[in-house]
Amino acid sequence: MNSSTNQVYPVIWHNNAVSLIDQTRIPNEYTFVEISRSEDMAVAIKTMIVRGAPAIGVAAAYGIYLGATEIHTDNRDEFLNHLENVAEMLRSTRPTAVNLFWAISRMMKIAYETLGTVDEIKQVLFQTAQIINAEDLQTCQAIGDNGLKVLPSNPEKLTLLTHCNAGALATAGYGTALGVVRSAWREGRLARLFADETRPRLQGAKLTAWECVQEGIPVTVITDNMAAHCMKRGLIHAVVVGADRIAANGDTANKIGTYSLALVSKAHNIPFFVAAPLSTIDFSLSDGDQIPIEERDPAEIYQVGDTILTPSGAEFYNPAFDVTPAEFITGIITEKGTFAPGELRRLQEKQVV
Ligand code: MRU
C-alpha cells in the first residue's frame, strides 16, 4: 500500500522479484510474499495468495518472465519449448478467469514474435509484463469513471451493493466493480457500500470491507442471503459486480452467488451492472454454458479455522463461480464505455475489442 494515498497494489515488481500482498491473511495481517520462481507464482495463484481475474493475469505475466529467466540456453527454439512448459504450468492453476489465459497468450505471442536473441526475448517479456500491469491500472480507472456515468441519477447519494472482491486487490489497483464504487465515493455520489460476505471464502467480508475501511468508504457487510431483504426494504439503489469471464452473448461468470444476486435485483427492479476490462470477454465462447467452472476443496465449506461445521457423512459441492445469463445484466461497464450484453458481438465486428 502506498502510505500517502492509501492505494493498494497487489502485484509489484521489486528487487528482481514479484511482491504479492498475501490476500489469505487480510484483514488480520498486511504482509507480502516474495516470488522469484515461476513455480512459486503458480502456487500463489492456486492457493489464492493472489486472486481476482485481472490480478492473476498480471501475476501470470510476471510468472512467464520469471520462468524465462530460469531457462539457461541461447538456442531460441529450445528456449521457446521450455517457455511453453512454464505457460502450461501457469495455465493449469485456475480455470475460470479468462484474464489468466489472455495474459499468458499475450506474453507467449510476444516471445514468438521477437526475432532477437534469447536475452532480447527475456527483456521484451519483462517489459510486456510491466505494460500489462500498468495498462490494467489505467483500465480500472477508466472503468470507474465510465461507471459513474451510468449509475442511477436518483437519489443524489447512492447505496450500492457488491459481491466478492473486485477491488484494487483483484486487479493491478483501483478495482473494477470497486473502482466504480471508488469513483462514486470520490465524486460525492456514494452514501454507503453494502458488501456481501461471499461464502465460502469470504472475499467480501475480508477483502472488500478492508479496502473500504482503508479509504474511509462507509461499508456494511451482510451475509449473502440478506440481499433480497435489503432490496425489499429499499436499501439498495444499484448492484455492481466484477467478472471472471464474459461469453460473446454477454453471459457472465463471476464469484458464486452472483447469479442469485442478479435474480433478486431483477425481481426488485434494481439495475445490475457488471464492471470488467474488455480482456475479460471471451469471444471464442458463444454462451456462458461453455465457461469452465472451478470446483474447489470442500473444506472451504465445512471448516472455518480449526472448527468443523458439519456432521461426518455429509457431502459437499463447492463451485467457485456461477454464470449470470445476459438477460439479467443491465450493462457491462468497460474501459471503453458501458454496453448492453447484446452489443458485445457488434463491438468485435467493429474491432473496438
Ligand atoms: O476466486 P476469486 O477471489 O479469484 O474470485 C474473484 C471474483 O470472482 C471477482 O469478482 C472477479 O475475479 C473480478 S475481479 C476484478
Image: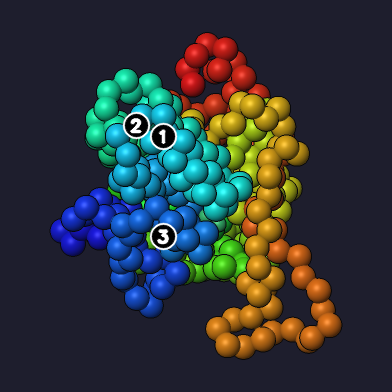
Q: Which residue is mark 2?
A: 75
Q: Which residue is mark 3?
A: 40
User: What amino acid does circle 3 point to?
Assistant: Asp
The residue shown at (45%, 69%) is: 24
Is residue 294 in sight in this rendering? yes
> Which numbered disc, 1 or 3, marks the residue that appears first in the sequence?
3
Marks 1/2: CA distance? 5 Å
Q: Position of residue 324 (x, y in %)?
A: 69, 43
Which residue is more in the foreground, 347 or 60? 60
Q: Position of residue 141 (x, y in %)?
A: 34, 39
The crowding category of the residue bearing disc 1, from other C-alpha atoms within 10 Å (few below 14, some 14 to 19, many at least 20), is few
**Residue 137 relative to residue 345: left or right:** left
The residue shown at (35%, 56%) is: 37
Residue, far right: 313
User: What amino acid does circle 1 point to?
Assistant: Glu
Q: Which residue is mark 1?
A: 78
- Is label 3 in a helix, a strand or a loop? helix
Q: Which dot marks residue 168?
A: none
- Relative height, residue 324 to residue 193 (above, below): above
The crowding category of the residue bearing disc 2, from other C-alpha atoms within 10 Å (few below 14, some 14 to 19, many at least 20), is few
User: What amino acid does circle 2 point to?
Assistant: Asn
**Residue 79 relative to residue 34: left or right:** right
